[in-house]
Image (cartoon, rainbow, N blue to C red):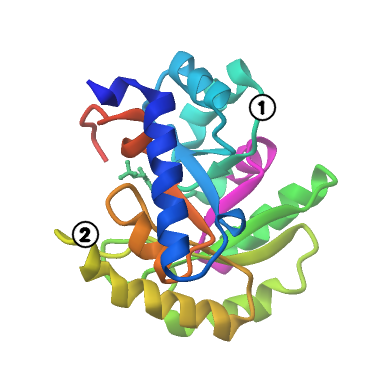
């Protein structure tokens, strides 16, 4: 089954990225493919790195810690899942990018922990694109006040926005959310837009994503788990 063929899967994803970019006159060079390796064991992550994935994404700090201790940092690691304030210290130590900053309290703690390590961490503000009550992420009207409050913090650098639009049966249903996110990103004067997963990264790229987070299409289906 092709799902075990990480190198072949990666090539197919890269080709799809190139096609989506070509459709809207973008260069694939301006897009970062983040291979989402949650639940994937280290041997298979190693294969993905050998095949040339440019970045890895994990959604749980604890799980990522074990993997990073084993694999080191052959490519940058991105935290893409929700972050509790009490894990900020570990997150700053482990990750190059944090996509899930959605409240000032968390931003302040990341800033404090990053400065203690003498570094500046690149972060994205997570936006609750569909305004779904059960999902994390700031509301659109909270972006500007958050940016203003965070701009004075030297330990974190806000590089863009991240979002997970509401689940959809057809990727085109996500297009209006992606388009709106791009408008929010532009209004905020930021560079990056992390949006698009296995099912909808091509639409996200057509709408301006600069980072796509792709797990299943590279590593195959994940075992079902609690969250
Ligand atoms: C799991 C996950 C992904 C990747 O999802 P796939 O559908 O497997 O590509 C992307 N973003 C986030 C935040 C995730 O948790």
Tell me where residue 21 appears, x and y as whole percent: 47, 61
Tell me where residue 81 appears, x and y as whole percent: 44, 47
Q: Which circle marks residue 74 in the picture?
A: 1
Q: Is residue 33 left or right of residue 132?
A: right
Tell me where residue 182 appears, x and y as whole percent: 47, 76
Distance in Å between CA atoms under marks 2 and 1: 32 Å
Q: SS of the residue at dot 2?
A: loop
Q: Which part of the image, by quadrant, shows the N terminus?
A: top left
Tell me where residue 192 appears, x and y as whole percent: 59, 65
Q: Which circle marks residue 182 in the picture?
A: none
Q: Is residue 131 left or right of residue 156?
A: left
Residue drawn 39% across the image and 28% down it: 8
Residue drawn 66% across the image and 27% down it: 74
**Residue located beneath label 2 in the image:** 167
First in residue order: circle 2 vs circle 1: 1
Q: Nearer the viewer, mark 2 or mark 1?
A: 1
Q: Is residue 197 left or right of residue 31?
A: left
Q: Quadrant of residue 131?
A: bottom left
Q: Which residues are magenta?
A: 88-104
Q: Which part of the image, by quadrant, shows the C terminus?
A: top left
Above/below status of 116 relative to 38: below
Q: Is mark 2 within 8 Å of ligand 1?
A: no
Q: Residues within 10 Å of mark 2 (few under 14, many from 20)?
A: few
Residue drawn 35% across the image and 22% down it: 5
């Amino acid at each position: 089954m092709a799902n075990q063929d990480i190198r072949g899967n990666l090539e197919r994803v890269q080709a799809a990225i190139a096609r989506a970019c070509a459709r809207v006159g973008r260069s694939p060079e301006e897009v970062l493919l983040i291979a989402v390796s949650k639940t994937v064991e280290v041997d298979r992550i190693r294969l993905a790195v050998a095949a040339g994935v440019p970045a890895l994404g994990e959604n749980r700090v604890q799980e990522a810690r074990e993997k990073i201790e084993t694999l080191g940092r052959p490519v940058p690691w991105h935290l893409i899942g929700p972050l509790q304030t009490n894990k900020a210290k570990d997150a700053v130590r482990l990750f190059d990018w944090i996509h899930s900053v959605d409240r000032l309290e968390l931003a302040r703690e990341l800033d404090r922990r990053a400065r203690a390590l003498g570094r500046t961490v690149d972060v994205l503000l997570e936006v609750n694109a569909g305004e779904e009550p059960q999902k994390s992420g700031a509301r659109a009207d909270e972006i500007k006040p958050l940016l203003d409050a965070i701009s004075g913090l030297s330990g974190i650098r806000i590089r863009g926005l991240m979002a997970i639009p509401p689940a959809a049966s057809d990727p085109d249903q996500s297009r209006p959310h992606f388009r709106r996110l791009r408008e929010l990103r532009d209004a905020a004067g930021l560079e990056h837009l992390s949006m698009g997963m296995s099912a909808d990264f091509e639409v996200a790229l057509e709408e301006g994503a600069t980072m796509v987070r792709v797990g299943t299409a590279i590593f195959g289906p994940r075992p079902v788990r609690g969250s």
